Image (cartoon, rainbow, N blue to C red):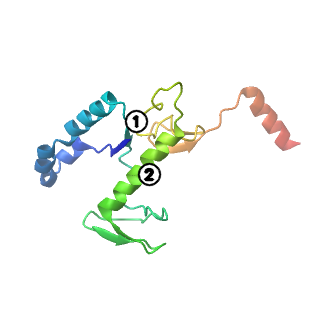
Amino acid sequence: VIVVENLNVKGMMQNHKLAKAIQQVGWGMFCTMLKYKAEMEGKIYQEVDRFFPSSKTCHVCLNQVGSLPLDVRFWTCENCQARHDRDVNASINLKNEGLRILTCQSPQRGEPPQGAGSSGTGDKACRPDVSRSNRGRKKSTTTLSVGQEAYTVLAESV
């Protein structure tokens, strides 16, 4: 299992301080080749959404700090007092999130997990009753037929 964060490489290239380093590394091409090679070898390539708070979530107790500027390389969790290196903590959280996404997907007849390679934040996420609105925010929805809806209203009023 290979888990990567789907970074906004195009947006990062607009930052003049990062552009040269990212261009030299070729992050987008690297991820494309990594996915291709993983699939060719029968391995699972899983992307985690770029908005997952991997750096600012304590991997020990899952407490999330409110703000963590990029210049802060080490931080201590307020909840469990664990000391974290920003990058090591993020990598552990990304691994755990990738495995969680894969666990929520059920393979059938020896096929790779449904949606392998996706970020796990769309319609195939763990909770089928949670969907994304067209603005990207999650909202809970419960679909009821007209008959069920009428029965629910009637039952509540009695």
From the viewer's perspective, is the residue at label 1 or at label 2 nearer?
2
Q: What amino acid type should be assigned to the residue bearing mark 1?
A: Ser
Task: Say few, some or many: other residues with alpha carbon within 10 Å of mark 1 (under 14 / 14 to 19 / 20 or more).
Answer: some
Q: Locate residue 93, reporting x and y percent.
A: 40, 55
Res. 54 visible in picture: no
Label number found at residue 118: 1
Q: Quadrant of the C terminus?
A: top right
Q: What amino acid type should be assigned to the residue bearing mark 2?
A: Asn
Label number found at residue 52: none
* Nearest to the observer: residue 50 or residue 45: 45
Q: Is residue 100 above or below residue 133?
A: below
Residue at 40 percent of width and 40 percent of height: 119
Instruction: Give the secondary structure at mark 2.
Output: helix
Label number found at residue 96: 2
* Nearest to the observer: residue 50 or residue 142: 50
Q: CA distance from mark 1 to mark 2?
A: 15 Å
Q: Locate residue 91, reporting x and y percent.
A: 34, 55
